[in-house]
């Protein structure tokens, strides 16, 4: 327990130091994404995670990827359930996004971003990343099928069977899971 508290204190201390800024300007207001108009196809929310614009210097994609892994490891220790709104998970996802967008040719960066989106339950972004990658490993197919199942379940619960079917069909192409089979039976 003592090791966890020390690691957590260290992680939070370094994050607090990184977020300290002398910039006194007001940050730009966040825009609310528009509601999708076509409910027959899966949502394509490609909204990038919010990034700290007061960072002292831009990191290379390799440095961002390393930071993402570091933050994710710390977040696993600090939080019992991973959600994007937790400081360390947010830092991990944001760093992974910077790595993946900074070097789009590096498949590992994009796959790690998809894994973090899935782990933090940001289902639509996870689904979009897995779809973008295309040819997935067996472990990635598990993550991708989970994101498709979650989105299908959400669509089915709001009464949108067409969208749910689209998610189920794509998820089944990745991997047939009991969740996807159960949702498919309800369509």
Image (cartoon, rainbow, N blue to C red):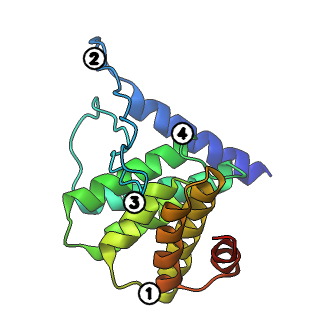
SS under mark 1 = loop
Label 1 and label 3: CA atoms lie apart by 26 Å
Query: First in sequence: mark 1 or mark 4?
Result: 4
**Secondary element at image label 2:** loop
Disc 4: which residue: 87
Q: Earlier in the sequence, mark 4 or mark 3?
A: 3
* 138 or 58: nearer the viewer: 138
Query: Which circle's residue, 1 or 3, is located before the other in the chain?
Result: 3
Give the side of residue 140 with respect to residue 153, left or right: left
Instruction: Looking at the image, tell me whether mark 2 or mark 1 is earlier in sequence order.
Output: 2
Q: Tell me the CA gap for discs 4 and 3.
A: 32 Å
Q: CA distance from mark 1 to mark 4?
A: 29 Å
Q: Secondary structure at mark 4?
A: helix
Local crowd size for mark 4, using a 10 Å CA cut-off: few (<14), some (14–19), many (≥20): some
Spot occupied by residue 70 in the image (x, y as percentages of width and height): 47, 57
According to the picture, the residue beneath numbered tag 2 turns out to be 23
Q: Residues within 10 Å of mark 3 (few under 14, many from 20)?
A: some
Which residue matches tag 3? Answer: 41
Asked whether 20 or 75 is in front, the reply is 75
């Amino acid at each position: 327990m003592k090791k966890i508290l020390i690691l957590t204190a260290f992680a939070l201390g370094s994050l607090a130091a990184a977020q300290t800024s002398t910039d006194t300007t007001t940050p730009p207001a966040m825009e609310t994404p528009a509601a999708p108009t076509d409910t027959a196809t899966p949502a394509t929310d490609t909204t990038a995670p919010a990034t700290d614009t007061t960072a002292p210097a831009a990191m290379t994609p390799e440095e961002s990827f390393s930071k993402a892994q570091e933050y994710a490891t710390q977040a696993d220790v600090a939080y019992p359930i991973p959600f994007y709104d937790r400081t360390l998970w947010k830092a991990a996802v944001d760093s992974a996004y910077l790595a993946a967008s900074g070097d789009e040719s590096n498949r590992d960066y994009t796959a790690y971003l998809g894994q973090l989106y899935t782990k933090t339950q940001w289902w639509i972004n996870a689904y979009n990343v897995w779809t973008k990658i295309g040819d997935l490993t067996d472990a990635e197919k598990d993550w991708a099928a989970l994101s498709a199942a979650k989105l299908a379940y959400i669509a089915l619960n709001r009464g949108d069977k067409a969208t749910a079917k689209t998610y189920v069909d794509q998820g089944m192409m990745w991997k047939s899971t009991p969740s996807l089979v159960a949702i498919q039976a309800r369509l």
